[in-house]
Amino acid sequence: MTQPARSFTGPLAGMKVVEIAGLGPGPFCAMVLADLGADVIRVDRAAGSALVGPSADFRTEVLHRGRQSVAVDLKHPDGRDLVLDLVEGADALIEGFRPGVAERLGIGPDVCLARNPRLIYGRMTGFGQDGPMSQVVGHDINYVAHSGVLSLLGREGQAPTAPLSLVGDFGGGGMLLALGILAAAWEARTSGRGQVIDAAMCDGSALLGAAFYGYWSTGAWSHERGTNIVDTGAPFYDAYETADGKFVAIAGMEQRFYDELVDVLGIDTADLPDRNDPATWPMTKKVFADAIRTRTREEWLGLAAGRESTLTPVLDPDEAIADEHNVARRSFVDVGGVVQPAPAPRFSRTPASVDRPPPVPGEHTREVLAAWGVEPTRITELERDGAIRQTEGEHV
């Protein structure tokens, strides 16, 4: 497939990143950097890579967008040396191996920093590079559980609810690793020295819950989940079903918004108890639920239009993509036939963009190596010896 020339228009244009292919948070971190203009090269396995989750085609794996792929055998001495050569010209490296694996492959931080003292070496794990659980395997829910945050999520009297992979993999993992890389790159501007970023999803999940740990520690947060102000306990901060089986979300936390909300819902305030008394919340919640169930979602949106009632629709992905506001903001883009969220945030002078769809592993091996300064004769030798692989055609 013929790909457009790379534009690198975002604020990170000029930054070069080597991503050692992994799953979840590492690719998310690399996607964010690529969206913002960095030249991110994904190093996939020469023996073939696999997808985890519902995706069945690399072309639809949104987390891999905006970058090119080279297929390298990291266990082959020439493959390892090739990665180290790429490191010499890179600003950052991302890897998500279990602690010690990169060292055994010969591409650990000591070796890489010896080749490039300015390199930012980003490491992504579940429990961190040290500590008694550093070698324990897991996935997002395990790290969010161990951070204490999962215990806070869910409704009263029910089991904790896993928040997709948003808190561990993407927010507490990949996003914080991207922030760490950029912070270290900023520091390197004056020190001239790189460093290692130890990003752990367990640590990051805890950090995302900082406000609630504070409330918990000061006694301002009930230890029973689903009974607090923003965890579905408060009647004025929840999602409710409408007459047509859809949902609206309300967030009347401040008194003036609450008053507007109650007025839109057509509820007589005389029928409601003190909103600040949690003991009365279950009763108020029933009043709200009964009221909201009397009209369709569109009817409620019509009544709330122009009012500061904090009532909004709960949109499914199809509805969100077609929503008037999201369309006006160009919040979603079509990349290779797959509609997906656009890069964020927005920049006034150096807009972020997605300049290419997700690659098939090894699709750009020769092209990338040539662009990064590898001699054509060496590329031929590496391919002949099995240290690298060029994928031909559309699929692996």
Image (tube, rainbow, N blue to C red):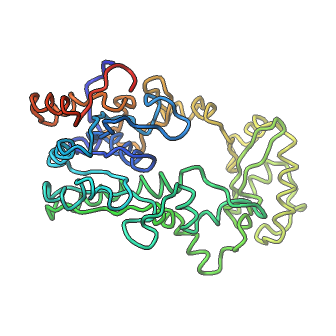
Residue 155 position within the rendered picture, expressed as x and y whole percent measured from the top left: 74, 60
Residue 293 position within the rendered picture, expressed as x and y whole percent measured from the top left: 85, 44
Furthest residue in direction right, as rendered: 271
Nearer-the-camera pick, 318 or 390: 390
Q: Horizontal placement of 3 versus 369: left or right?
A: right
Label count reads 0
Q: What residue appears at the point 66 percent right and 62 percent down from the top-left corner?
A: 230
Q: What residue appears at the point 47 percent right and 63 percent down from the top-left corner?
A: 136
Residue 275 position within the rendered picture, expressed as x and y whole percent measured from the top left: 78, 66
Q: Is residue 24 above or below residue 315?
A: below
Q: Horizontal placement of 119 versus 241: left or right?
A: left
Q: Horizontal placement of 280 versus 82: left or right?
A: right
Furthest residue in direction bottom, as rendered: 218
The answer to which quarter of the image holds residue 379 is top left
Q: Horizontal placement of 219 versus 297: left or right?
A: left
Nearer-the-camera pick, 324 or 240: 240
Q: Which quadrant, please, contains the C terminus?
A: top left
Residue 92 position within the rendered picture, expressed as x and y whole percent measured from the top left: 24, 51
Nearer-the-camera pick, 244 or 44: 44
Nearer-the-camera pick, 351 or 393: 393
Q: Which quadrant, please, contains the N terminus?
A: top left
Q: Is residue 308 above or below residue 7?
A: below
The answer to which quarter of the image holds residue 274 is bottom right
Q: What residue appears at the point 60 percent right and 32 percent down from the top-left corner?
A: 323
The answer to which quarter of the image holds residue 35 is top left
